[in-house]
Amino acid sequence: MEIRRRESNVIVVGVDGSKAGLEAVTWAAREAALRGGDAVRVVHTMAEWPLEMDDAAPHAEVGRWMRDSAAAVLEEAAQHVKNEVPGIDVETRLLAGDPRATLIETSRDADLLVVGSHGLGGFRGLLLGSVALGVSGQAVCPVAVVRARPEPSHNVVVVGVDGSPGNAEVIELAFAEATLRGAELHAIHAWNSAIIGYGPETLADALDAATTERRLLADLVSGCAARHPDVTVVERSRHGHPAEVLREASQGAELLVVGSRGRGPFAGLMLGSVSHALLHHATCPVIVLPTAQP
């Protein structure tokens, strides 16, 4: 998969008429304002029906109703953006095809793709919709997955640090997001190496391992910290499963930033197990940065 970093000044947000879609629109509008007035492109996909058809054709009335409904979804979302950030540049696009493939294609011309955690389809009770899961890790640009939640209780951006290929770009993106928000950055490194046995020697091994992991975290963060002296950084190295440690860290935060793949054994997967778990269970919006396959 080709991965590019663009300076398009466009945020794309996918909508489908659902409440979650409007929550994504609200978040995208506010993100555009933070970035100094980026344009917002609202995209809605009509699956398995031509956008243009002969009004005299069979079922033409159904087609007109579908197009009118789609236009109404786009108009509502565009108005929502204007209400959130008056004066912002808003563009709407009605496209045909599978929503996941369509949004992945639109990400080629975007700085950020924003989707809600759920759409109109799927099964009630699922923690994450198929579109949100399908585009994360496959889009060309970073993907923000937004779910309904209380207002953040802390002005904090959380980033997962693991030293995997592409993790330096994840850390850089997190610093940029913290700068935009004037937020504190919590750099979280979780390690789960087994500590086996009892007694003084085992305790010494555990302390040595903890010291090594703290040094690794400091080394990985130091370069970005020097380039962003205005950002207050809190470094936390914890023994535990990365998904659980980062889920806990996301509570009350404004944003969680992770890479699409970490240090797991299945390099061919589009989305790693940790980022997959966090998309389901994190309590704040999650940005997934696509990282090149090693």
Image: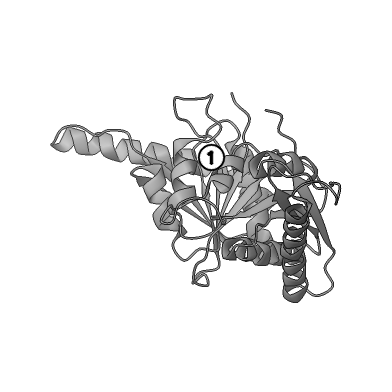
Q: What color scheme is it?
A: one colour
Position of the N terminus, as image quadrant, is top right
Find residue 255 and report its horizontal and vertical position in percent. 56, 58
Would you identify the image quadrant in which residue 104 lies?
A: top right
Question: In the visual, does 245 lie left or right of 49?
Answer: left
* Numbered circles on residues, count: 1
- Report the front residue among 80 and 205: 80
Question: Circle 1: is it few (<14), some (14-19), or many (20+) Cα within 10 Å?
Answer: few
Q: Mark 1 points at which residue?
A: 219
- Residue at 53 percent across and 36 percent down: it is 271
Amino acid type indicated by mark 1: Asp
- Residue at 49 percent across and 38 percent down: it is 162
Find residue 61 and report its horizontal and vertical position in percent. 76, 56
Position of the C terminus, as image quadrant, is top right
> Residue 229, can we see it?
no
Q: In this view, does 230 lie above or below 172?
A: below
Would you identify the image quadrant in which residue 142 lies?
A: top right
- Residue at 70 percent across and 44 percent down: it is 103
Disc 1 is placed on an element classified as helix
- Residue at 49 percent across and 42 percent down: it is 275
